[in-house]
Amino acid sequence: MVSELLEIEVRKALGDYKMENCNVVVSNRPDLCDYQFDGAFRLSKTYKKPPIEIAQEIATSLQSSSCFEKVEAVHPGFVNMTLSSAFINQVLEKMRKNEKFNLPKWEQMETYVIDYGGPNIAKPLHVGHMRPAIVGEAIKRIIAYVGHKVIADVHFGDFGLQIGQVIYGMKSEGISIEEVTLDDLNRIYPQMSKRCKEEAQIKEICENITKELQDGSQEYEAYYQKIFALSKKDIKRIYQYLDVDFDLWYGEMDSRAFIPLVESVLIESSLLHESEGALVVDVEKKEDTKEIPPLIFKKSNGGYLYGSTDMATIYQREKDFHPNYILYVADARQSLHFKQVFRASLKSKITDAKLEHLGFGTINGMDGKPYKTRSGETPKLDDLFKEVEEIFVASKETNASMTEEDKKKIVNAILKFADLQNNREKDYIFDIKKFADVVGKTGPYILYTYLRINKLLKAEPFIEEELSNKIYNEQDRYLRLQLLGFHKAVLDAFKLRLPSTIANYVYDLCVALNTFYQNNRISGLEDAKKKQDWLTILSLANQILKQLFYLLGISIPSMM
Ligand code: ARG
């Protein structure tokens, strides 16, 4: 990484000054310099000297380094660095010649289980389900790219009341297991969910069915199997559309066999105690500033809950994969649930993996409330895909003649890039018109940029050769500097589990590419070396874009 290379230079320049961390960061004033060091402020406290004096000493000493064209100390104590063309090109050469654009290798490969998607069986997928699928898929691809082992598990919600509700609905309508259809499920679930809210008696019946199913009732198991199969098939179809895939298509039900095992561990370690008829695990800690209620492991009617299956699943994952990390991409509003599960699991030592809840925010409409259609419903994903496609097709005459495959890729890019450019923890406003526009920070914009450069590269065949030491103008320099940011974007996305770091980098790189493209004509250039250098840089940029699109789950259409 460039900042690390520069840190080595700064460390050499420190002379007798001692400091642990000498971070060099990308300048936020690109008009003044490329990178900046602000350690003089900290040194000034230790060495009782004005920061500007220290900054001057460091700057003077850095001047001899070939990395820089200019190093300046500026008030009140910053060291501003402008990179030399030779240094920039050297780094670019390494990126060009090495695997993964010379991304640093991890010393140790670790195993990650990533749990994302989490759709609930028997409930139709709606816009809210898109986020965990898109964000989770990107995080999975990023972790694999930096060099770790990742196992993705969809973790269907198939243990809850909705199953009892649908079984009850089928039985009372006289729909048999053989004849039930997906449309029946989509109709019955909302009906029954409404009825259970209104009639306590019905709710109790549904709860009992759920409990009997959990306990292994043969009759209900047959219903469940059919409901699961129908629903899973439809969910898989939608995930396939979204290019989202899993190694494991397990559900909460698959953890059933491990519940008794976890229960005995909890009993053996005296962590389970009775509270109002239920068996619970205390998880509060002294340092808590808010009350953290106990995790309810077993209800008074003997039934198990969301927390119990999550613990059982941890047990199962530990046994199967012995992971170093288990990551959960799940709604930020579930943070208390995960806190309880993680604490109970670590306390009972069913795992020693690091457990992380990667929360995500809500997709809102213009009114700031969860996104609804004009008629006030939560839109189904199928309808949403259709709507996005229609808006995109209507935006330009020639779009209508694109192939179905290309249209699908663009719909994906529109939805994914709109989502992934936001920090996953934040809510965002869903505005299809804006997302589908080819102008702005959008999926169509980044794809269009790639395709435009690709067309140029195809029209101007060239043989790859070493870059010369030159940089030819401002837009050229700016583009090369952007390319140097690749490693930081990827590594930050990995460490922070934030695909937005990559999405934002992709956008910045596209802006630099377009600015370069609009101001510099390549075809017909007489200076052969200059032409060669530029084509090499553009080719590197497009290879990087392609790789990063993949990490974001975005595929490239054949044309636009
Ligand atoms: N099915 C859950 C929901 O709809 C999400 C599951 C998240 N993963 C987990 N292991 N709890 O909210």
Image: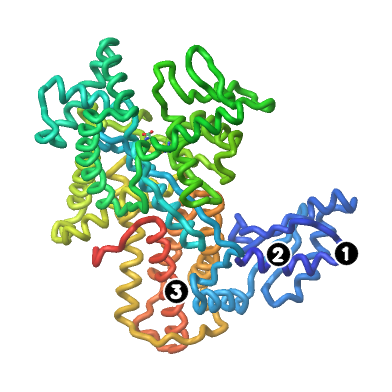
Label 2 CB sits under 8 Å from any ligand 1 atom: no
Question: In the picture, residue 62 is in which quadrant?
Answer: bottom right
Please give the name of the residue rendered at 38% of the width and 86% of the height, measured from the top-left corner: 462
Closest to the observer: 51 or 539? 539
Q: Position of residue 141 (x, y in %)?
A: 43, 57
| Disc 1: which residue | 16
Separation of residues labelled 1 and 3 (CA atoms): 41 Å
Q: Which mark is residue 540?
A: 3
On screen, 226 above or below 477? above
Q: Is residue 137 visible?
A: yes
**The residue at label 3 has a CB less than 8 Å from ligand 1:** no
Q: Secondary structure at mark 2?
A: helix
Q: Position of residue 35 (x, y in %)?
A: 64, 62
Q: Residues within 10 Å of mark 2 (few under 14, many from 20)?
A: some
Indicate the position of residue 360 as horizontal and vertical percent values: 44, 39
Give the quarter of the image for residue 8.
bottom right
Residue occupied by mark 2? 7
